[in-house]
Amino acid sequence: MKVLVVGGGGREHAIAWKLSQSPRVDKLYCAPGNAGIAAVAECLSVGAEDIEDLCAAAQEKEIDLVVVGPEVPLSMGIVDAMNEKGIRVFGPNAKCAQLEGSKAFTKAFLARHRIPTAGYREFTDKDELLKAVGIYGYPMVIKADGLAAGKGVVIAENEADAVKAIEEMMGDRIFGSAADKIVVEEYLVGIEASMLCFVDHNTIVPMESAQDYKRIFDGDKGPNTGGMGTYSPSLVFDEELKERIRTEILEPTLAGFQADGLDFQGVLFIGLMITDDGPKVIEFNNRFGDPETQSVLARLDSDLLDIFEAVVDNRLAEQEIRWSDRRAVTVVLASEGYPGSYPKGREITGLEDVDDDVVVFHAGTKFADGKIVTAGGRVLCVTATGATHDEARAKAFVNVEKIHFEGAQFRRDIGLIHKH
């Protein structure tokens, strides 16, 4: 089979790496890919959001299955475009992609189907919103409705911070049209966790759990990022909690999809807050999380292509999905200045010194004059596995220290539990 992975980040490297292990994959392509993905797939110089060109490339290369990594092309309707041309594609259609493309759409879905989540209100008028500052007390959760690369959420500790965030989002439009509508939510106290699920029309199957670290600095300080590291399985999950998530969140979500005519096929990422009252949904994403995917797929023992095909054919229920008992820890190496503006083009050294059983997933890299250089905010994701959580964590950090580029930053507390 010929498979095309759309995207060029750490998540797509992890997907391509796992697919490359399938005996059924004869040829693997990635568009646009990156310097790390080039080791396992042929990279095509087509952007992840150039939907017409991607469809043309899939037809020209006679691709049997397209796998879409990032959220933007999904929201733009890449799945619908591919389906119209008879190309098989793994990922939700544009109607379902609203679950990530609009926070308000998801909050209304959760409320309608009585799925536990934080109380909320939505605003399209800046003055109305400014009058409502503090409606749920502080901290105040302020979310841009649309896609903002994982950075459109501000947790304001006081009135001044809330007003500043609102002015930046709706006045200065730092997220563009993504903040034409703002969702304000009550602040949930607990431990954040994430659950990725494979979903087809009839079945929802949770993958192994993962824990993400969103803030840039140790101790969960500083601004939100796309994620600075993860580990799997999450240390906060036990059998009782898994059962509650299944009955209170997963099953009602699938029933809600069916009731609302949302023919979801792909990956549903559920951001959770484990509160004293039980698990509550913070957000839905309609694709693999990044960098959760790097930790989760490192523990997958089944053939990922078999699972993708089962989802596309609506026979997920027949698929046995096996997971390793080994633990995984992923540490992100980011550029100086991230999540704000950052330099690019800095040479990366030491990649060849990493242990053979540690995988370095490339998130923002490219080739320049025969060297691998930085090309993004998050640059590399160092993923280690071990028989125990502590072994995996220690191995990840030993190998992070072997890799160098000017201004590299990373969190040293990935794998430690924090109360949020």
Image (cartoon, helix red, strand yellow):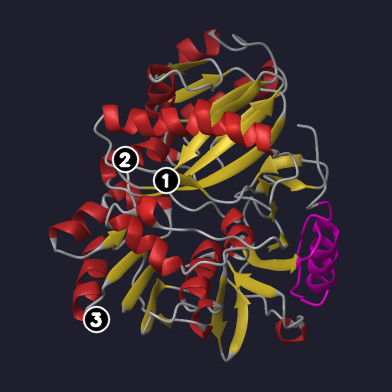
Residue 96 is tagged as: 2
Residue drawn at x 59%, y 8% as measured from the top left: 135
SS class, disc 2: helix
Residue indicated by mark 1: 286
Kindly identify the amino acid type of the residue bearing the numbered disc 3.
Lys
Placement of 23 over or under 288, stated as above or below: below
Question: In terms of image quadrants, where is residue 67?
Answer: bottom left
Where, by quadrant of the figure, is residue 26 drawn?
A: bottom left
Cα distance in 3D space between marks 1 and 3: 26 Å
Mark 2 or 3 closer to N-term? 3
Q: Position of residue 199 (x, y in %)?
A: 39, 46
Assess whether mark 3 and mark 1 are in contact (beta carbons under 8 angstroms).
Answer: no
Q: Amino acid at mark 2?
A: Cys
Mark 1 and mark 2 in contact (Cβ < 8 Å)?
yes
Looking at the rendered structure, the secondary structure element under dot 3 is: loop
Query: Which residue is found at the position 54% from the left and 67% from the top?
Result: 14
Quarter of the image that includes the N terminus = bottom left
Mark 1 neighbour density, 10 Å: few (under 14) some (14–19) many (20 or more) = many
Residue 355, image x and y in percent? Answer: 77, 81
Identify the secondary structure beneath mark 1: loop
Q: Which residues are magenta?
A: 386-413
Residue at figure coordinates x 36%, y 67% from the top left = 47
Separation (CA) of disc 2 from disc 3? 28 Å
Sequence-first tag of 2 and 1 = 2
Residue 323: in sight, yes or no? yes
Q: On screen, 211 above or below 253?
A: below
Task: Tell me where residue 43 sits by quadrant.
Answer: bottom left
Please give the residue where the numbered disc 3 appears in the rendered image: 61
